[in-house]
Image (cartoon, rainbow, N blue to C red):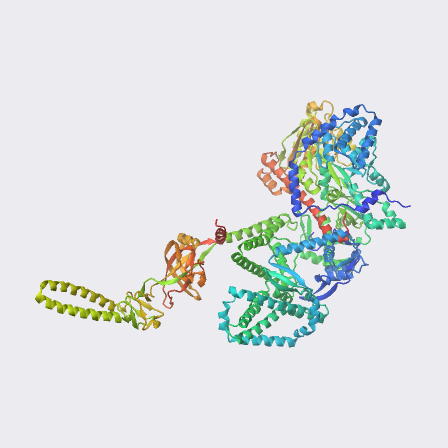
Amino acid sequence: MESMPSTNWRMLAQGPSRVELPRGLDALWHEVAGLVGSRIRRQSRLLRQAELIVSMEKRFLRLSDRKLRHMASQLQERFRLGRDTTEDRNLAFAIVREVASREIGLRPFPVQVAGALAIEAGCVAEMATGEGKTLVATMPAVLAGWRGRGCHVVTANEYLAKRDATWMEAVYKFCGLKVGCIEEGMAAAERKQSYNAHVTYCTNKEVAADFLRDRLTIGRLKGLPSALLAKLSGGPGGEIDRLVQRGLECAIVDEADSVFIDEAATPLIISGASPNQDHSEAYELAARFAKELDPSAEYRVDKRYREVNLTQAGKQRLAELARPVGGLWACARRREELTMQALVAREFFVRDKHYVADNGKVMIVDEFTGRLMPDRTWRDGLHQAIEAKEGLEINLPKETYARISFQRFFRLYRKLSGMTGTAAEARAEFWQTYDLPVIVIPTNRPCRRTAMKDRVYTVGVAKWRAVIDEVRRVHQTGRPVLIGTRSVRASEYLGGLLAAKGLQHQVLNAVRQEQEAQIIAGAGQKGRITVATNMAGRGTDIRLGAGVAHLGGLHVVATERHEAGRIDRQLYGRCGRQGDPGSAQAFISLEDELLQQHARLTSAALVRHCSNNDREISSPFSRSLVNRAQRRAERVALRQRRDVLRTDDWLDEHLGFAGRDL
Amino acid sequence: MGIDRPTFSQSWYRVADLAPRLLGAVKVHRQHFRGLKWYVLQDPANNQFFRLSDAAYHFVAMLDGRRTVSQVWRTCMEEFGDNAPTQGEVVNLLSQLYSSNLLQGSLAPDAEELFQRHQRRVRREVTSVLTNLLFIRVPLWDPDRFLDTWVGLVGRLFTWCGFLIWASIVGTGLWAVGGHIGELASQASSVLNPHNLPLLYMALVVVKIFHEMGHAFACKHFGTQEGTGGEVHQMGVTFLVFTPLPFVDASSSWALRSKLHRIVVGASGMLVELAIASIAAILWVRTGEGTTVHAIAYNIMVIASVSTLLFNGNPLLRYDAYYILLDVLEIPNLESRSRLYVYYLVKRYVWGVRKAHDPSHTKGEKGWLVFYAVAAMLCRVMVFSAIILFLRDKFFAIGVIFGAIMLTGWVLIPVGKVIRYLATSHALDRVRVRAVLTSLVGVLSLFIAVGHVTVPDRCRIEGVVEPVELAVIHMKTAGFVCNFLDSGAKTGPDGPTLIEAWSPKLEAQRDQLLAELRQLQVNRQSAQTREAAAAQILEEKIAALEDQIERNNQDLQTLALRSPISGTWVAPDIDAISGAYLRRGEHVGVVANLDNLRIRAIAGQTVAARLIKEAQSVVEIKVRGQPDMELAGEIETIMPAGHERLPSAALGYAAGGSTQIDLEDPSGRRAAEPFFEILVVPFLQEETEMRPGQTMLLRLETAPKPLLVQGWRSLLRLFQRRFQV
């Protein structure tokens, strides 16, 4: 007798919930509700409840493990049946607290419990760095696990997912729950097993990609009845076993701002080889023609918008060049598109800056982090144009199979919650896009970080000189210094400068996450100098070495401001954790990318005003210039994310006939 | 990328593997517009149309339910090269076809989606009704079978023979009317008479039913002739500015291949009306004035000709002539495309968007598009303002509501959209500064034009002509008129007598008095000799009698009346009183100095207040009923408010003037509101002859003010008057 797991049944029968954003008056109401909601101070109520839960600890202290397990399993039953009450929740949190202290030696503080309550209530809990968010997540995750419909704990990178899963496994195990962890390169069967665990740790990319792959499978199945028939007839019923997920029930997102906001700018695309595409010679020809065109007369380069336009003469020349080829090249638009793409590849893409050619393949370099991204390609034939330019073998462009934006994906969860160190700035966006209210949880101990005023310089050289001076000065006092850079190149450049001055340091580039996590964990030792990109060692605490606290704790130097204030705050949050002392300061030059992109004219005017001297120009005006540029960058990014969402909506509305793109 | 139509689209993957096809029932018609081939898809289920370009049609035609979209696209690319639809265009095309319910095939059967689509359509219809409250349509009847039955008969009219019949009817009608232009004009003023309105409306409905039937039959006739069916499924009532009138949906004429046939279908309504008008004209000429048939014929004639030519014949409004114009110019969707083209021009040349999409297909239509966009806009503004002004006067509340709706729909929403577009559109990413600046400059210059450039500020008031010197002549003594001066003759203190009368009573009295006098004189002479005392008494009696005689003499003399001033003798009814007995004090006529006339004008509070403050003393004067005559004058005095009695009944509503009068006053001279009187002295010109009692229109000019200020002031005044604030 054939059987179908209830999880698959549910997925096929229900399909995903509708995820349209409210419109018109609904949207207005939603916005007003968000505004009103943000005025309500839920913090103190949560803290009171947390105190209540903490006060229950005496009941369990004397209990044997066996009895505690028994209590837990009794509770689990109630949660599974959906008959849990507030008291049950409090009791469950108290039990998890007790279990955590027994199994991994950490007993959640009241603020951590408050954070857990906020997550359980479906909010984003803002908890400062170093407050133990990993532990916080276990409490609502256990509850969700008990409910038995799966719980995804989503983290920013794989290392963290694995680390947290292993770290917290004992707690879940004690509560009678299985833990899974999704890693890159896992086989479908393993994935399925992990997703079928009560609690699954995963990264946002993996979980969304698995979801899309499942949707492709479901799309082939065409609904429950035909899936059942297929299964009965023993035909292609195997399809149904290829589903790895069991529906999107509950997600707890760590680093919620980076997952929900920063990564939401680009949608996730699943693609594969395409059977019939333009022939690879076309790209080679285009590259050849591009070389023959005269840059002054036949095409124009627009540096600001990174585009190339053929002039009338260029078009004619191209037509002459292409005449003997015929075929595809007889068609003017296609011909010009290909050639322009080849010109863009020639004019704007620099080897080893934007990409590296390795083993006969072109690999994209992420300008932001400096990491290689072997599994990503440029679109619209640009990748092929670059391959042609480098004279490599051309890999034909892949075809899109499915596409989803992270905004849309996360809105599919029935219960969504998150936690992060920096959420308050993006409060409005969390509400508008994900219906998530933000609750700021206070720190366990008062924060002792001194934020020093930004220092602004005219040119980059002056800034770097000042950074080195500052590092040396602080280093002499024995305090550890963490220098944050925006890109790998900057971190390497700074590393070179420090080496030239004879300063011992370590450079982290977010390439090997595991080792870097260890390095950064040691960055708090006395006398250490660590240069790290923004992404390096995320989610890892920097504990202060012995005696460092007396010297004044960790000093963080930011060498640039980022596109969002949140990200700056994440870097500053590296010091002054859990009531430690610490200080943070940013060094900015008018040549920084942020200012160049978002306040070009004003900063150019300011440079002229300072008669091009390479000196410090810190003043309220220059600082406000920087802040303005940052706000502008935030707005631009927000608009970009809105567009992603809007594109989704548009596609949904107009291409509904082609099946829902979920 | 600087490419106008990029070949590839990101969303291609969603349609690439589908294998849809057009619905089997869809009919395809080929048409030519300005030398370009187009295909019109007709959905017979709901009579909706969808126009495709040649390349797009080939793409759609190749979809047969077996080939996938991407296969077909590839074939198209090979075959048509640059003209083939790009991926993005295909995606759009499929989505449009799908939402018009024209696609079938391996599509996901999503019931929820279907319902949502239905809901969206309903919502769109509701909003279109709400935004178009002045033109609501209610379909009532499906006339298709009726037309099928009768088209064989009626259809014969749509031939050359029928045209000749039509032409002869119209010709006869014109010829009949030709000799009666004067009567035509004289009756015209009574058309909008309140008593005439129900008749007028009835005539309108009847005429319009024939009009719509004309469309319906023409559509049916040519449809069956060409084999496109020409189905007409909707007939009903449209509420044109709340006036219920019939309408018919003859949109299946769009499927007709022959341009001439389409034009005839569009024009047939008007042709029918003109024929009706001609028949009515003949009737009108043949019947006697005063009969009901005569009145009805006149109304039908006016409606069927004037209203047709004014509304249906105006291509700037979306009535018959518009559709005829489309076919004559061969520019389908002229209105929406002309608007799009103007947007395009603004985007391309004012804002400098290089990638703006040009919606025109051929060179020749560009000029038409621009012209039509501007002309139609002006026309619409004018018509709607007229409607609103009309509503404002008749139904103030509705007028205000419509004003508000129009302000929102025509000003606020478009402006909001433009602002939003300027702020967020990606097309403007590179030229946003320029776009914003040019738009601001545009708006600013508009504001300067409206708000700063002053234009003369004028107002119109009415007045009557009166002489400055005027003598009203009354009978001073009762008597029988025996002789009189003809009215209109010049006279003066030394001039001829105006009227002479004889009074037998006075003459008898004189004779008696004279006789008595003689007797007394005789008595006195005899008394003088006898007793002095008696003579003394007689002396006194004689003196008294002489006094009486003197008075009697005077009375007799005043039987011949003379003018106290020099001027013209005006006594229109003088012929009638010849030989009549006139009592003392009876009005005979006036003597007015016509060389010295002035105008007594009346002005409401609001106008007068402005005049007192800032009026230039020179005014323009026009004679009511003689617009070609122009005079000028000067304000002499403005007499303060408080007058309630009009100087002439001619200024009141009842007599065609513009001043509201108190309805309870029988004389029609009591104004509803007190007014100011303004005396104006005209500069006399030789050839103009003003007559006392003539109504004059005075145009007063005050200091020039910006249009904005003027408009605001009149708006405030309107509300003030309505709400007494």
Q: Can residue A493 be seen by looking at this rendering?
A: no
Image-based side of B26 in relation to A196, left or right:
left
In the image as oriented, which residue stretches furthest toward the left? B529
Image quarter of residue A359? top right
Q: Is residue A127 above or below residue B708?
A: above
Percent across and percent down for residue B217 are 67, 70
Closer to the camera, B587 or B229?
B587
Q: Is residue A24 above or below residue B487?
A: above
Closer to the camera, A91 or A180?
A91
Percent across and percent down for residue B247 are 63, 64
Image-based side of B98 in relation to A35, left or right:
right
In the image as oriented, which residue stretches furthest toward the right? A1
Percent across and percent down for residue B603 are 42, 56
Closer to the camera, A234 or A162?
A234
Image quarter of residue A125? top right
Closer to the camera, A219 or A284?
A219
Q: Can residue B229 be seen by looking at this rendering?
A: yes
Image-based side of B383 in relation to B591, left or right:
right
Percent across and percent down for residue A524 are 73, 27
